[in-house]
Image: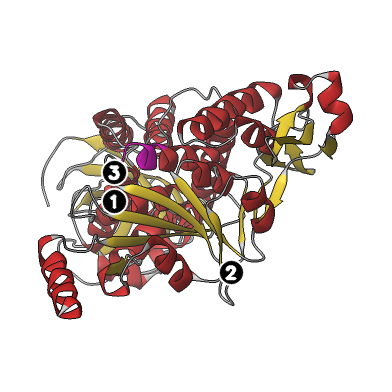
Amino acid sequence: MKRILSFIFLLLSSYLYPQEEVYIIPIQGDIEPSLAVFIRQSLEKVKDDQSTIIFEIDTFGGRVDSALKITTLIGSIKGNRTIAYIPSNPESLGVSWSAGALITFSCSQIYMSEGTSIGAASPIYLTSEGSEDAGEKTISALRVQMASIAEKNGYPAEVALAMVDKDIELYEVDIDGIPSLKLKEDLSEDELKEGKEFLKKDKLLTLTAKQMELYNISKGTVKDLDDLLNRLGKNKKNVTKIIKTIPDLVIDLITSSSVLALLLVLGLITLYMEITSPGFGLLGAIGLISFSIIFAGGQLLGTLSSIELLLFIIGITLLIIEVFIIPGFGLTGVSGLLLIAVSILLSRQEFIIPKWEWQWEEFNSNSFTIFISFIISIIIISLLMVLFPKLSLFRKLILSPQIDKGEPTPLLNITNREGITVTQLRPIGKIKIDDTILEAKSDGSLIEKGRAIRVISHTGNRVVVEEISNDTSI
């Protein structure tokens, strides 16, 4: 009878007090801006504030700014229990180093699988000569942040500090029979004599799973995820693992530096060809799509504002003025290109002027990507300016008025010959000299259809003309 009553009680309890949902969010690979976007979107999928969220952390580290964003996202969670879990399996690295350690300490509890480790969180930066430690200003700021996050979640600040700062010295001492790690300067002479030196100066702290458990930092060492769920008293049926979907992978793609460079080169080339060609065609659409994707990436990263869009529009406007109104290519055109470059640069970062070393690293990386993209674009555009008249492929891609009076015919040098425009030159179009139709380019100004022109340069198939009269007869 008692067994029956117990069964009924448990059955009713399962309906009256349903099992809490468990969400598993992976933090794997390099800590990048796109990962912060994924974490933010994953947390939005958590249905209630009574769920348990397990962050499966497996990383060598990454960008400090992205790690700080992720710690802020985790720290802002209300009600939910947050658990950092460092797994050990054939697909994992088994580590939570550098920026990963910062993220781990932002969770309210830590569990680690056997054979894993955590630590080595001092920021380093890549230079032309290799890697080097960050300056004291950056280390000091990150040291304070690391200690603050550790204290907030009940972890020993000394451990967090020693993972960031090489000047920290730790001793192992027994406090009420429990081994603990303490700063050397916080111990008395007697405690130093009784204690054991654990971490010497000029070394960063890295702890194994067993050591994290021994010093009462983690909640325990588990075999695998199933073992962790059993310890937490969670039913596997209530577990939801959030994985990256195709849209998440697309976000990773369009926010990467390599795709930014590719889109920028494509956008600049098609933009030039569209501006210098009659009508609006496929090339213009490709250019608009390329720049739209670039700015969409900034929007997803949360770094795009109306200022960047305004600068881009002004830059495009200056380029159009340079092509159609001002002969040649001078200050106006250069200013337009600079504004376009600045708009794209600012759309990929939250700051205007770098302050911290990780901001300088981000600024230098973005600037290099944009600079190289502009150089490649200028080289390709220069080649197209020479080859364009010979490439029928481009003429087919551009919507231009149809000419009934024959095809361009090769001539001897026609410099100083006069003729008339049969299409608008903006700056490329069609002219007629005697009875011959030619493709020509203006000297930089817009020349309307039916205007008298003079050839000022003729090299191969490249014909450059200037307007000499406003008469309109054809």
- Our reading of the magenta stretch's main secondary structure is helix
Residue 88 position by quadrant: bottom right
The residue that disc 1 covers is: 43
Is residue 368 found left or right of 243 in the rendered image? right
Instruction: Give the number of the disc on residue 194.
Output: none
The residue that disc 2 covers is: 88
The residue that disc 3 covers is: 299
Residue at 15% x, 61% y: name it. Answer: 401
User: Between tags 1 and 2, which lies in front?
Assistant: 2
Q: Where residue 255 appears, x then y in whole percent?
A: 40, 52
User: Between tags 1 and 3, which lies in front?
Assistant: 1
Query: Magenta stretch: residue 127 in it?
Result: no
Residue at 26% x, 54% y: name it. Answer: 51
Along the line of sight, the residue nearer the viewer: 162 or 314 = 162
Q: Where residue 336 appears, x then y in whole percent?
A: 37, 32
Is residue 194 found left or right of 400 in the rendered image? right
| Residue at far right of view | 193
- Secondary structure under the numbered disc 3 in the rendered image: helix
Residue bounds of the magenta highlight = 72-77
User: Between tags 2 and 3, which lies in front?
Assistant: 2
- Secondary structure under the numbered disc 1 in the rendered image: helix
